[in-house]
Image (tube, grey):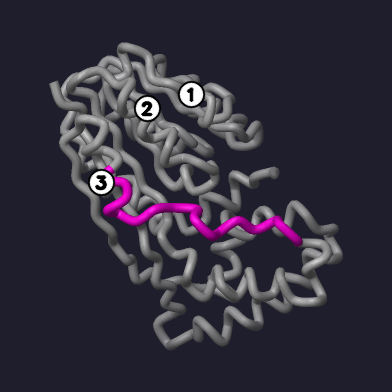
Amino acid sequence: MKWDPTKYVEFGNHRDRPFHDLVARVQASDPRKVVDLGCGPGNLTATLADRWPEARIMGIDSSEEMLHKAESLAQPLGSLEFQQGDIADWAPEDDTDVVITNAALQWVPGHQEMLASWLRALQPGAWFAMQVPGNFTSPSHTLMRQLAESPSWSAKLDGVLRHDGAVGSPADYLNIMLDAGCSADAWETTYQQLLTGEDPVLQWVRGTGLRPVLSALSATDAARFEAEYSAMLRDAYPATGHGTVFPFRRIFAVARKNS
């Protein structure tokens, strides 16, 4: 599946806020190495170099398109580097003191088991902070699945969308962290995002959740699917005089490995 870095960073204030809310809960004072799993275009990873200027900052992502965008950020910052790789193959090294993963684990089947293994491998005092979207039962996703499963599209989109079990609950992540020998905190926030412009919810999901559908269809079919889907979204998220309100639930969990 190909990603569009330019489309991904649209609605930057809304997409960036959960990352900053997550990192604010990490109280590491002098980490040696900070890893951002699923770093995307790297714009948020670069802020970690400001937060921890003495640390080595490593961003990891599987998308060549995203990393091409990220590399331009690494050049002026000697402490910042990016690496292409599947985060499912990643494991912490002994000097990994902070791990951040923001809106990435929902794309990784079985990530809860991987999370447990990562936490067990961390050294005492290390931090792990994660955020995943918790909106898979919202209209933006249920309508997408409904349309993909309709007679008009089911043959072309069978098995493309994976939403059941994509993420756990805050309690699930809290228990994983506690069982791995960490002090932990987990919570959820629903951001009431005010979007503007024409078909803003469609524009939002084009950058993330709709990517598998767009990748599976021809350009003609993709345009037709979007036309049908956008009409459904307009009914579900009506525009007001202030803009379009798009509620977005996010799930957060932060752990610190016990001594």
Tell me how far mark 1 sits from mark 2, CA to CA: 9 Å
Tell me the residue that label 2 is attached to: 118
Q: Residues within 10 Å of mark 3 (few under 14, many from 20)?
A: many
Mark in the foreground, 1 or 2: 2
**Is disc 1 placed on a helix, strand or loop?**
loop
Tell me how far mark 1 sits from mark 3, CA to CA: 21 Å
Q: Quadrant of residue 118?
A: top left
Residue 172 lies in the magenta stretch: yes
- In the image, taking residue 28 as reference, residue 189 lies left or right, namely right
| Residue 133 against residue 28 in the figure, above or below | below
Q: Give the mark nearest the N terminus, 2 or 3.
A: 2
- Residue 7 in the image: x percent, y percent? 60, 53
Q: Quadrant of residue 240?
A: bottom left
* Quadrant location of the N terminus in the rendered image: top right
User: What range of the chain is rendered magenta?
Assistant: 158-175
- Residue 2 in the image: x percent, y percent? 69, 43
* Quadrant location of the C terminus in the rendered image: top left
| Residue 247 against residue 214 in the figure, above or below | below
